Amino acid sequence: MKRIVQKMNFRKLGLTALLLSSTLGLSAQTSVFDVIAGSPDHTSLEAALIQEGLDVTLDDNSGTFTVFAPNDLAFTNLATALGTDITGLLNLPNLTDILTYHVLGSIVPSSVVTNGEIVQPLSLTNTLKLTVTDELGTVFVNQGQVIAPDLPADNGVVHSLDAVVLPYETVVDIAIDNGFNSLAAAVIYAELMPVLTDPLATYTVFAPTDQAFENLAAWVGVQENGVAYDLSELLTPEVTPIELMADVLAYHVIGTSSVLAADLLNGDIVTPLSLSNNLKITVKATGDAFVNQAQITGTDIVAENGVVHILDEVVVPFETVVDVAIDNGFTTLTTAVITAELLPALTDPYNLFTVFAPTNDAFDALATELGTDLTGILALPNLADVLLYHVVSGDVESGDLVNGPVPTLNGSDIIVDLSNGVMINDAMVSLPDVEAENGMVHVIDGVLLPPTAGINKNELNGFDIFPNPTADFINVKVEYFDLKDVSILNNVGQVVKITPLTSNETRINVLDLAPGNYTIGVQGQGKSKYERLVITSLK
């Protein structure tokens, strides 16, 4: 208090001192502490500096200092967040460390600050991370914004801050200290340092490795011009605008809690800082865990404002074929995909898929036909096999479909029939061409069952063709008399021969077909059967 009174008396006599200094040929010295003490908005900082004896340090005109000076509102906000008051802050055991964390031992005007600078303050507990925004040139020190820059003093400069910065080991420090160089560069480029260095926030960060960012850069380059980019090219406004990279990075951060690996559950759908999409969590029976398509390869690196898990890929907030199912009420299909641990495959933003998506009613109908319920369907040991039978590689619009077999990710073929609408095996496409950013979804009214499923509800058991291979004739034997005809399709799905069925056994001449591989099939009574047909040359 004596010191404060002395300062006040000095200022009251300012004119006398100025006249005296002029008379004696001397010039008055203003220290960075004088600037702080003379400000009506920095009384809490002044009191803290005096209490810790740092006023003497900052009054030393033989030194040089840059002080990032939190204003009174910043101290009030910190006290409120910690559930205390200004008196409580002044009693913090590490107050000296906090205060010296705001001071550099050199003079740094705001004009020389560059985005991404990491500087060492007088405190050795941690570094300060500086951000300069591209659009407005606003300067941040960790999470604190410089609201009044470049207040001059004879031994340095003072920049007023709107927040107290704390020397905590944040999730940003985890990235920097553990060699996540690409992630750190992306965070700096996207101007997210102020968000992620907030010492009073709680974050869960899924941190992609350097290789993951290299893979992303290469993929973006190939998509745009056929040549892989490197990270420096990726982090440019021409390739990735700042706001887009900020959204991608925010998609890796849960901003409400610190979620340890043991707390992750299969099928969790969580909201990240990005509002563009949700994250889909998979925890397999093996214990392997995934965020969308990316595998968690390292867990539970704890910071003072959260926890970091390592990912082997960058996740991006694309609307995938999985999101189409989730967003459009395909609850049974979604549950089945989660149960079969297929989320990592189908949320992959770097591959294209075409999904024939059964409705909820289609799954209900299958359960009824099999004499079970949805629980029984989800308990099928070959559930993943069945679901992958609904997925074709590539982005196939309905207009690109042709008659015939199409290979699926299951390994078996589905059969496309365009003679009466669009049929996939025995299921009708009821809504085509629902677009996703990693493919296409066609809604179907039935569940497709592959030959490997061991479930034959829609397969004609009484269908036989012989001889196969053949060079001239083939016999087709069926049990059903209401089957209309036999179709033979070539290897691109075109119908090359249709033969009516007049009895349960029909002889078909194939001498007019070139040697090669074909598909032969019949349909009727809501059932179907297709097989490979090989036509050889006559000897």
Image (cartoon, rainbow, N blue to C red):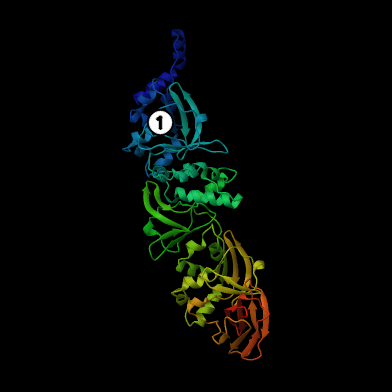
The x and y percentages for residue 9 are: 40, 20
Does residue 477 sit above or below 128 in this rendering? below
Q: Quadrant of residue 299?
A: bottom left
Q: Residue furthest left?
A: 93
Placement of the N terminus among the 4 image quadrants: top left
> Can residue 6 be seen from the camera position used here?
yes
144, 241: nearer the viewer: 241
The x and y percentages for residue 472 are: 63, 83
Does residue 182 sit above or below 420 in this rendering? above
> Can residue 420 be seen from the camera position used here?
no
The x and y percentages for residue 192 are: 49, 44
* Residue at 47% in and 15% down: 15
**Given the image, on which type of amino acid does mark 1 rest?**
Val
Q: Quadrant of residue 88?
A: top left
The x and y percentages for residue 534 are: 59, 78
36, 112: nearer the viewer: 112
Asked which secondary structure carries label 1, the reply is strand
Q: Residues within 10 Å of mark 1 (few under 14, many from 20)?
A: many
Does residue 457 sit above or below 96 in this rendering? below
Say whether residue 366 is left or right of residue 126: right
Identify the residue position indicated by label 1 in the image: 103
* Residue at 51% in and 67% down: 334
Q: Quadrant of residue 525?
A: bottom right
Placement of the C terminus among the 4 image quadrants: bottom right
Say whether residue 324 is left or right of residue 194: right
Say whether residue 472 is left or right of residue 272: right
Please state the total of marks drawn on the protein image. Answer: 1
